[in-house]
Image: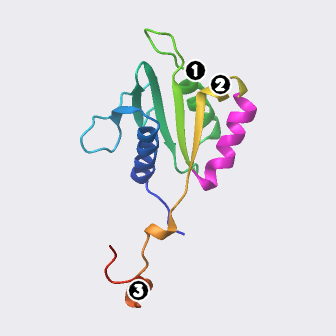
C-alpha cells in the first residue's frame, strides 16, 4: 500500500479548507505562502481565515515513536484557542491517515468532549485510481486513445 508524505497530507488539508471557503494565510511546506507561526510550543501546518473566523490545520501522519500524551496536549491546546480581538473560538482541522484515525477519534471523544465541537477530523484516503502502476503502463490501455 502506498503511503502519503507529510507534504501530500498538507496539500489535501489545504484543498479541504479552500473548498470550505477559507483563504490561507500560512502553509508549511508550501511554495509561495510563508510558514505559519508556532502557537505556544506546537507547530501548526496551516493557518487560514474566513471573514473574521480563523482556522488552524494540523496533520498527524505517523504516531510511531510519538507519545500519545503529547498529541493529546497538542490537540487540547490548539482546540481551546480563541481569537485575540473577537474572542471567537478558533476551529481546529486535523488531517489523519486511516491507521491513526481511530486513535485520534478516541482521544477527542473520550478525553476532550468539551472541545469536540471546535475540532474537525478529516480522514485522508489514498486515491488508488490516481496512482498508475508500472504493470498497467506495459499493457494496452482499456481507454480510448483520444478522449474528447
Q: Are marks 1 and 2 in contact (CB under 8 Å)?
A: yes
Question: What crowding class fits label 1: few (fewer than 14 Cα within 10 Å), some (14-19), or many (20 or more)?
Answer: some
Whether the magenta-drawn stretch holds residue 58 is answered as: no
Closer to the camera, 61 or 63? 61
Cα separation, mark 1 vs mark 3, equals 52 Å
Question: What crowding class fits label 2: few (fewer than 14 Cα within 10 Å), some (14-19), or many (20 or more)?
Answer: some
Which labelled disc corresponds to residue 141?
3
**Local secondary structure at mark 1:** loop
Whether the magenta-drawn stretch holds residue 99 is answered as: yes
Where does the image place residue 102, in percent across and percent down from the top left? 69, 48
Determine which residue is flagged by label 1.
80
> Is residue 41 visible in this depiction of the protein?
no
Where does the image place residue 80, in percent across and percent down from the top left? 58, 20
**Local secondary structure at mark 3:** loop
Q: Residue at x 27, y 37 (%)?
A: 33
Q: Residue at x 53, y 31 (%)?
A: 92
If you read the primary sequence from the N terminus, does the residue marked by circle 2 or circle 3 appear first? 2
Amino acid at each position: 500500500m502506498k503511503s502519503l508524505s507529510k507534504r501530500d497530507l498538507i496539500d489535501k488539508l489545504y484543498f479541504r479548507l479552500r473548498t470550505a471557503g477559507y483563504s490561507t494565510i500560512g502553509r508549511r511546506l508550501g511554495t509561495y505562502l510563508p510558514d505559519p507561526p508556532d502557537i505556544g510550543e506546537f507547530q501548526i501546518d496551516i493557518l487560514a481565515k474566513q471573514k473574521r473566523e480563523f482556522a488552524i490545520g494540523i496533520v498527524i501522519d505517523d504516531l510511531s515513536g510519538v507519545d500519545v500524551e503529547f498529541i493529546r496536549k497538542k490537540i487540547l491546546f490548539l482546540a481551546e484557542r480563541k481569537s485575540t480581538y473577537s474572542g471567537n473560538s478558533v476551529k481546529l482541522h486535523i488531517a489523519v491517515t486511516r491507521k491513526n484515525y481511530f486513535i485520534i477519534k478516541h482521544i477527542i471523544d473520550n478525553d476532550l468532549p468539551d472541545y469536540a465541537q471546535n475540532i474537525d477530523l478529516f480522514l485522508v484516503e489514498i486515491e488508488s485510481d490516481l496512482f498508475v502502476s508500472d504493470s498497467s503502463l506495459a499493457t494496452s490501455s482499456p481507454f480510448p486513445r483520444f478522449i474528447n
